[in-house]
Image (cartoon, rainbow, N blue to C red):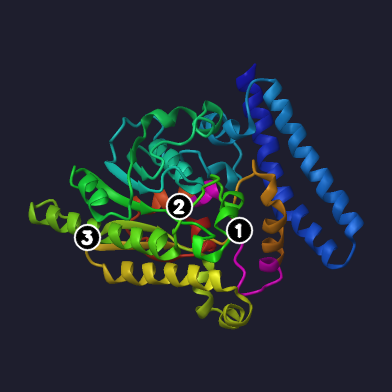
Amino acid sequence: NTNTIQSVVGNYCLHRIEDTIVEEFLPYTCIMMSKSNFHAATIWLILLTTSFLGYEFNCMVHGFSSTKLYNNNLLESSSTTTTRRQTHLFSNNNNNNNLSDNQKGKLLVLGGTGFLGQTICKRATLEGYAVTSISRRGKPSPTEASEARLGSYFRKVDYRKGDARQFDTIANILNEGGYVGVIHCIGLLFDDDSGLGTYNRFVSGSGSIPDGGSSYDTITRLTAFNAIGATSAYVQEQEGQGKGFDSNFPFVFSSAAEAGWPDVAGGQQVEQFLAPDWLKRYLKAKREVEAKLNEASPPLRPVIVRPSLIYSLDRPASYLPVGAFFVGNRIGLPFVDRPVTVQSLANAMVRSISRTSVRGVQRYTEIDALNQ
């Protein structure tokens, strides 16, 4: 019985794999490498990779994937009884599985076809929001939109193709009315000015390739400034019509843990002496958006999530850097935040929409709390 296999195998294997591999084995691998025990580290990596790929192949042979297990059937199953933290990533703790569409209102997601954006759209539909996505691509690629990857939620999202660098693109959609929150997750790690733009496809979870001339100033700062301005105007117009939000309209921005380096011990020194130029410009754009968003309160309620590395169990290529960050955080380096799964981050961002007490900077500990 496929459903039984998905519940039992998925419940045991996927969560045990995430706990054990990511939080224990990978840090140990990095520790062994730091001690020049490269043979042992290599053996560990081979075992981890082949184990995961073997499990994934077995799932494919039986007609389902670990991604579908992780994102769809397993965590929506009422028979799942485990209380581990990871089971809440795509479960519905509020028993909203039978919510009718649009019950919670409309949610605008900027960058809804990206690695994080796709997961946010899925989480939001499960929570009962009507989701509108704006992106350059419009819809995810056919591969990304497959049932195994995104599930049936793909058909529930209103995908719009548009350029968020144009203020009217965002304003016109918001003026359709009914929106109760905005999430901005547009971004790129390597811009065209860095000379590394062609490599962005390898570090981007969605394989995004930036346009020629794309920079942190246009992709991160300009799109966010436009969204903040358009959202503020929308809220003020709604208040003028007697449909006010009590100056508590949520705007969620995906920043970066390193944007907080000036506030932690050693962070300024790391940025000043070790960070490459492209990273400094990347963080400058993130901080400018954070400042702009805070200035827009009220009428907006700023929620600024600051994840470090964002990973997913179905992407083994990220295991090594994720493990290194786990080690750095575990040994107490104040400028290294623990990585977070894309599922837990998306879950936290969506939940912050309805939790009116949530505002300001949210680091990994607050992200964990929003997943409880």
Residue 201 on image: x %, y %: 57, 49
Q: Which residue is mark 2?
A: 211
The secondary element bearing badge 3 is classed as helix
Q: Are marks 2 and 3 in contact (CB under 8 Å)?
A: no
Label 3 and label 1: CA atoms lie apart by 32 Å
Residue span colored magenta: 328-345
Residue 330 sits inside the magenta stretch: yes
Res 64 → quadrant = top right
Residue shown at the point (62%, 82%) measured from the top left: 273
Q: Residue at x 51, y 40 (%)?
A: 90
Earlier sequence position, callout 2 versus callout 3: 2
Q: Residues within 10 Å of mark 3 (few under 14, many from 20)?
A: many
User: Is 191 one of the magenta-colored residues?
Assistant: no
Identified by mark 1, the residue type is: Pro
In screen coordinates, is 287 left or right of 100? Answer: right
- From what the image shows, is residue 64 above or below residue 243? above
21 sits left or right of 272 in the view: right
Residue behind mark 1: 339
Amino acid carrying mark 3 in the image:
Ser
| Relative horizontal placement of residue 210, taking residue 292 as reference (left or right) | right
Q: Describe the element under mark 2 as helix, strand or loop.
A: loop
Cβ atoms under marks 1 and 2 closer than 8 Å: no
> Label 3: which residue?
232
Task: Please state if 120 lies on the left or on the right of 198 as rendered.
Answer: left
Which one is earlier in the sequence, the residue at label 3 or at label 1?
3
Question: 347 and 196: which one is in front?
Answer: 196
